[in-house]
Image (tube, rainbow, N blue to C red):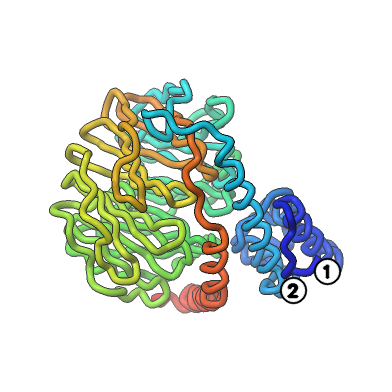
Amino acid sequence: MSQNSSPGSGEEALAALRDRLQELYRRRGRPSYRELARLTGHALSHTTVGMVIHCRRLPRLGQLELVVEALDGDPEAYQGLWLAADEADSAADSAAVGTRPPARPGGPYRPTGTALPHGDAVDGVAFHPEGRLLATHTEGRNATVRLWDVTTGDPLGGPLVTHNGWVHMLAFHPDGHLLAAVGDEALRLWDGTTGESVGDPLTIHSTGHHTVAFHPGGRLIAVGGNDDTVRLWDVTTGRPAGEVRTGHRHPVFAIRALAFHPEGRLLATAGNDATVRVCDVVTGEAVGGPLAGHQSEVTGVVFHPDGHLLASTGNDATVRLWDVMTGEPVCSPLMGHIGFVADPAFHPDGHLLATAGLEDGNVRLWDVSAHRPVGEPLPHSGSVGALAFHPDGHLLATGGRDATLRLWRGESTPEPHLSRRRAERLRARLTAVREDRDRLAREVAASADGGGDP
């Protein structure tokens, strides 16, 4: 089957991609997955390399490109096959919409009946990229990090090694092989599946660590501190990779105060100076002026999955949506929470935005296109400080000061994105993304060798 063919089903399109990829793997002499992981600069783990090559389900485009490059293949020769498989899957989802029951009046997410006893307040939550595991953390003295089995609701062993002090945020590596958490004293890394400690704690900011995020390519990790900077660390070498001066006038401190653009070129930060700022990851320079509108501390920031929007939350009880290209708000502030709002998260397909109310004890869902609330708030018996969507969107996890971790299941399927339009956007950006990623890798390597800024 040629790469421009249009298979009649997602399974046929995926099989075409799998056959082509495994043919390349055989031609290269079947190198070990560990060797291929090394050739990706350890941007992917050997487990993820194996999953991509077996291709039992559609891998992420970036993961596919890295594996093909490691096999000395041409990633562009596989893009058409990947897009065909992605479009076929989306078409199948669209066909299934009419067979599913409509949403209940309460909204698109309902309780699963699972409220996991956490023992302490849940202040952070993140799903493993494959969706099988969930990580949580508590704040306060002797804070802990825990891993949970999403299917059974059982904890995986005891708490991971505690921080001597506060834990402010945690994040999984894009391929899931690492889990990072930052606290007052250090950045710590664990194996994302077993929970075993990886390396020694890293002191990146002498003034304290407050926020953390992995670059979408997996090679860099960004840590925001109390000194107005975000420092970049090369995960593959364990060495610094430069510094981004954010331009905030107060500490870069919030629950979700930094986020990488999905294409990896931009970094957004939120600070106590009531602004959101966007910087170029490579140069460290500001991109446009500050996004101003919040009346007090900005507590969270997140990019839309396709990169065209940015959402921010604040201590002024508002949620705001911004156009990434222009820096302008796309609508009036979204109102409904009382007091402190935090931890914004987009549904994986981008149609919903979830936000947490630390003072009102509610999670609210917002229709991103219509700029309005969806259904009734999802309540906790105390303030809510953490939430995350499952990678496929069917679950929403929320954590609160009532010491419970709650799971909510999606009951309805919204109108799907037009997959053809999404594919066209992908095709239009593939060349630019590839050039940016290659340039970023070169600049990071150079800065790691010379100790300068990226």
Total label count? 2
Q: Is residue 68 left or right of residue 341?
A: right
Q: Secondary structure at mark 1?
A: loop
Which label was assigned to residue 28?
1
Name the residue located 29 percent from the left edge and 23 percent from the top edge: 381
Name the residue located 36 percent from the left edge and 40 percent from the top edge: 164
Name the outermost residue toward the front: 98
Identified by mark 2, the residue type is Asp
Q: Is residue 428 left or right of residue 9?
A: left
Q: Secondary structure at mark 2?
A: loop
> Residue 246: x percent and y percent?
28, 67
Residue at mark 2: 72
In this rendering, the answer to whether 286 lies above or below 407 is below
How far is mark 2 from mark 1, CA to CA? 8 Å
State the residue in front, 2 or 432: 2
- Of the 4 image quadrants, the one containing the N terminus is bottom right
Q: Tell me, yes or no, whether the two marked residues, 2 and 1, touch with CB atoms within 8 Å.
A: yes
- Of the 4 image quadrants, the one containing the C terminus is bottom left
Name the residue located 76 percent from the left edge and 54 percent from the top edge: 12
> Residue 358: x percent and y percent?
25, 36
> Residue 10: x percent and y percent?
70, 52
